[in-house]
Image (spheres, rainbow, N blue to C red):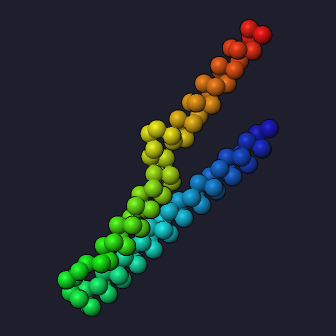
């Protein structure tokens, strides 16, 4: 029993590390690509029209949602909410079965 518990914890930890690696990889790509686009924008028209900001804004929204998911920042439907809701439903189900 103890062995399977350790293995389960290891698998969850490994999955968490993979989530973090994906997020930081995405963030690194964002910084490098947007910097490159900014440089191209500057050298082609000296920011007369800062078109690279459209890409920064769009991809930035994606980064924000990725961070919310990775770091469980959603106060409404995060992992803690999910756990509480499961426990509540299980309690309600137990109480309903007592009366049958």
Q: Nearer the viewer, residue 32 or 43?
A: 43
Q: Would residue 43 appear left or right of 93 to someone viewing this image?
A: left
Q: Residue furthest right?
A: 1
Corner quadrant of residue 88: top right
Up/down of 81 relative to 91, above or below: below
Up/down of 18 relative to 43, above or below: above
Q: Residue furthest bottom?
A: 44
Q: Residue furthest top?
A: 99
Residue at left offset 45%, top offset 74%: 29
Up/down of 15 relative to 99, above or below: below
Instruction: Locate residue 41, reporting x and y percent.
Output: 29, 85
Q: Nearer the viewer, residue 82 or 41?
A: 41
Q: Would residue 1 appear left or right of 63 to someone viewing this image?
A: right
Residue at left offset 51%, top offset 41%: 78
- Quadrant holding the N terminus: top right
- Quadrant holding the C terminus: top right
The image shows a total of numbered marks equal to 0
Residue at left offset 74%, top offset 8%: 99
Instruction: Locate residue 8, reporting x and y percent.
Output: 71, 46
Instruction: Locate residue 92, reporting x and y percent.
Output: 65, 19
Q: Nearer the viewer, residue 25 or 57?
A: 57
Instruction: Locate residue 91, reporting x and y percent.
Output: 65, 20
Residue at left offset 69%, top offset 20%: 93
């Amino acid at each position: 029993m103890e062995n399977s518990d350790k293995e389960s914890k290891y698998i969850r930890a490994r999955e968490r590390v993979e989530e973090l690696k994906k997020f930081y990889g995405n963030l690194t790509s964002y910084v490098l690509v947007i910097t490159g686009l900014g440089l191209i924008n500057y050298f082609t028209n000296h920011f007369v029209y800062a078109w690279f900001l459209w890409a920064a804004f769009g991809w930035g929204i994606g980064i924000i949602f990725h961070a919310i998911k990775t770091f469980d920042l959603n106060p409404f439907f995060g992992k803690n909410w999910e756990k509480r809701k499961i426990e509540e439903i299980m309690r309600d189900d137990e109480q309903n079965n007592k009366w049958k």
